[in-house]
Amino acid sequence: MTPDPFEIFCLYYLGLSPEGEVRFRNANQVAKLYNWTPSMLFEFLQRHHLHPDVVLNTDFPFASHQVDLQLAAGRESPEELRQRAQRVYGDFCRVAGQKRRDWLKEIEEEKLAEQESRRGGSLPN
């Protein structure tokens, strides 16, 4: 049985299994669940605009969604976690590949923040 893009998104990027277990898996682990090779997984991700290159270069707060899901796993049912993941998936699909991250700007901001922290100051909002 071929999974749908949402199921793979949940497993690979959010760490959410269809059973509601939250545990991060790497490409080899996800591919093995479907009797695929990692290259087959990446081809699937590419076809559905979910390849890591797209994800990495889209301005989207993945880390905060991953943490929110992990924290929610202790208090929400598998169905509630799935609904939460569907919202994240929908939000991501709306901006995937459209709102690109500005890596140079992020690097410059990190440099400035590091310089300020060394001086003991803080940056204005």
Image (tube, rainbow, N blue to C red):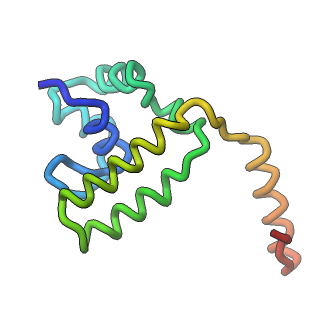
Closest to the observer, 52 or 27: 52
Q: Residue 89 placed where, x, y %?
A: 39, 43
**Percent x, y for residue 25?**
29, 46
42 versus 23 height, above or below: above
Residue 42's place in the image compared with 121, above or below, is: above
**Residue 56 percent across, percent down from the top left:** 55, 38
Q: Position of residue 49 (x, y in %)?
A: 44, 26
Is 108 rendered above or below residue 44? below
User: Image check: 45 left or right of 124?
Assistant: left
Q: Name the residue: 80% across, 73% down.
A: 117
Identified at 36% across, 19% down, the residue is 43
Figure check: 83 above or below 115: above
Image quadrant in which the N terminus is located: top left
Q: Residue at x 61, y 43 (%)?
A: 59
- Image-quadrant location for residue 69: bottom left
Is residue 69 or residue 103 the one in the foreground? Answer: 69
